[in-house]
Image (cartoon, grey):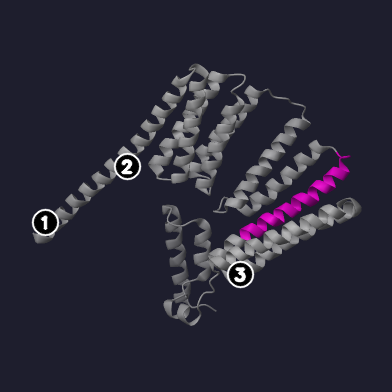
Amino acid sequence: MPSEETTATTTGLQGEVARWIAAGIITAEQGERIVRMGPSTTLGSATKHPTRHFTVVAELVSYVGIVLVVASGAMFVARVWTSIGVSGRVGVGVVVALVGFVGERAVSRIGDEGTTRLGRFLWLCGTGGVAMSTAVIVDRAAGHDPHWTLFVTGLVVLIVSAALWRNLERPLQFLTSVAGLVLSFVGAIVLMGWRPNDLVAGLLIWASAAGLGTLSLKVLHPSLIATLVAQGGVFVGAMVMTGPSRSLALALGLSAAAVGVWYGLSSKQTPVLVLGVITFFSFVVRLLSFYLRGPGTLLAAFAIGVVLVGGVMWRSMRSHGGNSLGGGSQHRGFGARLHH
């Protein structure tokens, strides 16, 4: 039975971890792991019982091995797919799902960052197995109707992935949740007999991606992956609208790309900044190609590129110089206070 001192220490640790999570220092998943380790984990105990480290080489070899197993298994199944029947096809998906989920359970016990990433990858394989079995069953039950197969399979992938993701720092499960949502939504639209034109479809994609980007600022995790997915979504939505409404597509595309550049600079997230600059430049070139003809388009694109790169470099150098000067004045003030 734990002593009162141990209980109090554990309660204090939980409070500190909750404060760290609220401040954004660690994620909720990392906080759970810290609390599970408990206050008894000291330097002395860690020295007596060293942590098992899963090296980068071991992690890479594991991924390569999994890919080889999946590829060889897929080739074998493809050869016998027509001869194994529905029950055999469902069984293949069940085996893949069990290997993925049970394998994640086994490797996660090691408690290393590398094995955690490997476990998330095995979850992805398990989700694929569930999707395979579901697609086979629904295809048979719905009389080979691809629309029902798409809708139900996407819905199952969404449910499984969302249960594994739970708004934690799990990029693969977040991506499969988004994929399941898209598949089920498209399947539902087709089943309802709705055939939206390019303008409506583009606006729907753009608005959904913009909402995802807004939620990624404070609500969704992993924030970076969600932001990148949102940037890709607004780009695709604007491109879909280009045919029926060129002006609206360019306006929405340029505005979303500019927001991406601004957010990438302000948050100092290089992937967001790079993707924002690429999409902004793409829409600018597209705008010039529509309204300018001849060599003027190339010269304008070149000038805009120079201005963008020069502006970013100038801002970075100015910020660096300001920080250096500010830091020097702070050190001088601190030294003066010590002197007094």
> Few, some or many C-alpha atoms within 10 Å of disc 3 (few <14, some 14-19, many ≥20)?
few
**Image spot of residue 70 (x, y percent):** 73, 58
122 horizontally vs 295: left or right:
right
Q: Residue at 46% across / 41% down in the picture?
A: 274
209 horizontally vs 146: left or right:
left
In the displayed orientation, state which residue is furthest to the front: 295
Is 170 colored magenta in this rendering? Answer: no
Find the magenta span and give its range. Answer: 119-144
Q: Earlier in the sequence, mark 1 or mark 3?
A: 3
**Image spot of residue 115 (x, y percent):** 59, 65
The residues tagged by marks 1 and 3 sit, at their Cα atoms, a distance apart of: 54 Å
Q: Is residue 17 above or below residue 314?
A: below
Q: Which of marks 2 and 3 is nearer the N terminus?
A: 3
> Few, some or many C-alpha atoms within 10 Å of disc 1 (few <14, some 14-19, many ≥20)?
few
- What residue type is disc 3 on? Arg
Q: Which of marks 2 and 1 is nearer the N terminus?
A: 2
Q: Mark 2 points at which residue?
A: 316
Report the magenta stretch's main SS: helix
Is 120 colored magenta in this rendering? Answer: yes
Which disc is residue 109 wearing?
3
CB atoms of marks 1 and 3 within 8 Å: no
Which mark's residue is nearer the viewer, 2 or 1?
2
216 horizontally vs 154: left or right:
left
Q: 37 or 134: nearer the eye?
A: 134
Which quarter of the image is occupied by the C terminus? bottom left
Q: Residue at 79% across / 36% down in the picture?
A: 147
Q: 182 or 23: nearer the eye?
A: 182
Q: Name the residue under label 1.
A: 336
In the displayed orientation, state which residue is furthest to the left: 340
Q: In this view, does 223 lie above or below 68?
A: above
